[in-house]
Amino acid sequence: MIRYLVRRVLGGLVTVWFIATATFFAMHAVPGDPLLNDKAVTPEIRANLEARYGLDQPILTQYAIFLGHMARGDFGISFTQKNRSVNDIIREHFPVSAALGVLALVFAASGGIVWGALTAQYRNRLPDAVIMFLVILAISVPSFVVAALAQLGILYVNRWFDASVLPVAGWGQLRHALVPALVLGLGTMAFLTRLMRSSLLDVMDADYIKTARAKGVGPFRVFWRHQLRNAVLPVVTVLGPAVAGITTGGFVVELVFAIPGLGRYFVQAVQQLDYTVIMGTTVFYGAFLVAMVVLIDILYGLVDPRIRLQ
């Protein structure tokens, strides 16, 4: 177990290094000067920034400086936001994205398991056809379209009740996060529904299920103790990337609903060519994704005692 964990951690570090390297050279391949903004208005400020990040040095020297800062956990200072470091931006705004992502993951996981179980129990019947049609629709429609339609629906609901039942945008209370979290987790919910359906159909005709039924075990207990527990393992496997993807992937949703999360600042950084914010958030996202995948691999072994990590 310990040797497996060490290998996974070392593999994760190599992955993070690769992400950082690819992002570094990709950013340097983008045309433009990252210091052409309101912050670097004087030659003195420009010279200080060039000296700190080695922007006047060869690219390999800049790469070494970047790796040194990254190893110390220092992602630098934003080129466009005055007196704000990238670490401060991540520290202040990632909790907002994480809170939204956790709520979206709750919607996605619970909905995926419930709808997947229903489609498997009523396969080739009307509930199965209706749910699978909605699943395909949820996967096909882009998130920004769903977000816009959700805002339009909120307006109609508020007008119908002649009161502010749900806010159209903003952040601060739980009701601000309900609709954005549902929109953010909709695609993952649809994917988990399909995965849960196929997994349940695979175990429904297994020998141990037939044996349990032959012994007179009730349908609910067969489903809860035998079918669901074994069918949920593939869902647990994909929860690692799903956690990281939902928690850090709500760029469009945060912009549409005016949520002050980290994704919103990442989009602004790309638009403004904020070199340090792009690099810092990309490496942070990559490290978070790797950590979630390793964590889910460990939990996978705990869910099913038959699995032993060798």
Image: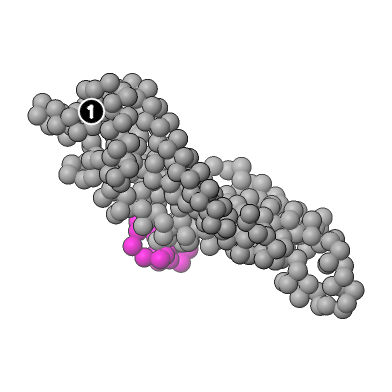
The answer to whether residue 183 is left or right of residue 228 is left
Q: Which residue is mark 1?
A: 54
Residue farthest to the front?
3
**Residue 21, quarter of the rendered image:** top left
Q: Nearer the viewer, residue 259 or 113?
A: 113
136 to the left or right of 152: right
- Main SS of residues in magenta: loop
Q: Residue furthest right?
A: 214
User: What's drawn in magenta, residue-wise?
Assistant: 160-175
Q: Secondary structure at mark 1?
A: loop
Q: How is the image coloured?
A: one colour
Q: Quadrant of the C terminus?
A: bottom right
- Residue 31 in the image: above or below residue 225: above
Q: Where is residue 126 drawn, in percent x and y? A: 78, 58
- Answer left or right for 73 relative to 3: left
**What is the total number of numbered labels drawn onto the structure image?**
1
Q: Residue 24's spot in the image, x, y percent?
A: 37, 31
Q: Is residue 277 visible?
A: no
In the picture, the quarter occupied by the N terminus is bottom right
**Image point (23%, 28%), residue name:** 54
Residue 74: x and y, percent? 27, 44
Residue 225 inside the magenta-drawn segment = no
As drawn, 27 above or below 16: above
Magenta includes 172? yes
The residue that appears at 36% across and 65% down in the rendered structure is 173
Q: Is residue 290 above or below residue 32?
A: below
Q: Residue at x 65, y 59 (%)?
A: 308
* Residue 228 can be seen, yes or no: yes
Q: Amino acid at mark 1?
A: Gly
Residue at (86% x, 73% y) in the render = 213
